[in-house]
Amino acid sequence: MSDATKLATAAAAPDPRTGLRAVAALRKLLEQLEAAQVASARAQGWSWQDVADVLGVSRQAVHKKHSARRGLLAGRGRED
C-alpha cells in the first residue's frame, strides 16, 4: 500500500487526531505534487493561463502561487 493510500485511509479514521494529522500530511503532499506539475508544465512552455485552466483557477491565482518558485521564470522574460 502506498503512503498516499495509507494517509487517505487514516484521514477517515474515527480518531480526530489521527484523521487531522493525515489530512495535514495529504495537504502537504498535494502542494508538492502541484508544484512539481506546474514546474513541469512551465518548463514545457505552458502559459500561466494553460496551467490555470487545467487546475480550475484564475491565471492570477496560479501565477501568484507558483511564479516565485525557483527556476519557473528563469530565462523566460515574460509573464504570459
Image: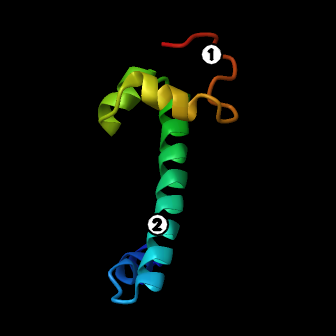
Residue at the far front: name it.
16
Residue 38, relative to residue 72: is it above or below?
below
Q: Can residue 32 be seen by looking at this rendering?
A: yes
- Where does residue 1 sit, x and y in percent of width and height? 42, 84
Label 2 SS: helix
Q: Quadrant of residue 23?
A: bottom left
- Where does residue 9 sit, x and y in percent of width and height? 35, 82
* Amino acid on which the number 2 mark rests in the picture: Leu
Residue 22, relative to residue 53: is it above or below?
below
Q: Which mark is residue 66?
A: none
Disc 2 target residue: 26
Q: Can residue 44 be seen by looking at this rendering?
A: no
Q: Which mark is residue 76?
A: 1
- Where does residue 35 sit, x and y in percent of width and height? 54, 44
* Amino acid on which the number 1 mark rests in the picture: Arg
Which residue is found at the position 44% from the left and 29% from the top?
Answer: 61
Label 1: few (<14), some (14–19) or many (≥20) C-alpha neighbours in 10 Å:
few
Task: Give the color scheme: rainbow, by chain, secondary structure or one colour.
Answer: rainbow
Which residue is found at the position 31% from the left and 29% from the top?
Answer: 53
Q: Nearer the viewer, residue 34 or 24?
A: 24
Which residue is found at the position 45% from the left and 75% from the top?
Answer: 20
Which residue is found at the position 47% from the left and 83% from the top?
Answer: 17
| Label whose residue precedes the other's in the sequence (2 or 1) | 2
Label 2: few (<14), some (14–19) or many (≥20) C-alpha neighbours in 10 Å:
some
Residue 71, relative to residue 6: is it above or below?
above
Q: Nearer the viewer, mark 2 or mark 1?
A: 2
- Where does residue 37 sit, x and y in percent of width and height? 48, 43
Label 1 SS: loop
51 sits to left or right of 77: left
